Amino acid sequence: MKVRSIGVKEVHCAAPDATLTDIATMMRNYGVGSVPICEGDKLVGLVTDRDIAVACIANDRSGSSCFARDYMGKPLHTISPDTDIKRAAKIMSDNQIRRLPVIQRGKLVGMISLGDLAIALKDDDKLVAETLRNISEIS
């Protein structure tokens, strides 16, 4: 099965100069745990709810004074819609990431999460458990 058959197809991006308050509002409004950061059509980063909580708020900073460009995760791992979902699980596992942007011809076309993989790989409990264990492992 290919990545194109799972995950979110409608992805909402924020600009690098968006505040983390703006991004948290997007997360709430769209029911997501991460927001891609884009310059035009180009994906340049990803801000997660954890980035907001741990890097900004826990350091006693206001979300309105923290900007996406300063808190977006790097390096950025991406996949294509034609990637096999087992390969996507390996990328997520190896890099301890829970969300993976899907890029086609340089443009963000979707996002897959650990939950999407678990549903798609429901017949492969061993791979799902291994992926979750590796992503959750403290490094």
Image (cartoon, grey):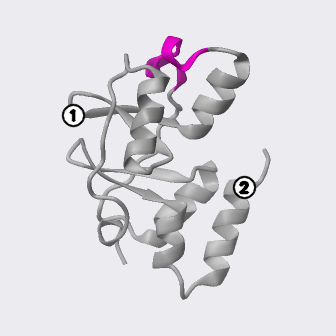
| Mark 2–mark 1 distance (CA, rounded to whole Å) | 31 Å
| Residue that numbered label 2 is attached to | 136
- Is 57 one of the magenta-colored residues? no
Residue 67 lies in the magenta-colored region: yes
Binning the other alpha carbons within 10 Å of mark 1 as few (below 14), some (14 to 19) or many (20 upward) gives few
The image shows residue 49 at horizontal and vertical percentages of 56, 39
Give the residue at mark 1: 41
> Where, quadrant-wise, is the N terminus in this rendering?
bottom left
The residue segment tinted magenta is 62-71
Residue 87, image x, y percentages: 48, 66
Relative placement, left or right, of 113 versus 38 is right
Q: Quadrant of residue 111?
A: bottom left
Q: Position of residue 30 (x, y in %)?
A: 37, 48
Residue 35, above or below 18 = below
Q: Position of residue 77 (x, y in %)?
A: 47, 44
**Precedes in sequence: disc 2 or disc 1:** 1
Q: Where's the C terminus, which quadrant?
A: top right
Compared to 135, does 36 lie above or below? above
Kind of residue at disc 1: Asp
Residue toward you, 7 or 33: 33
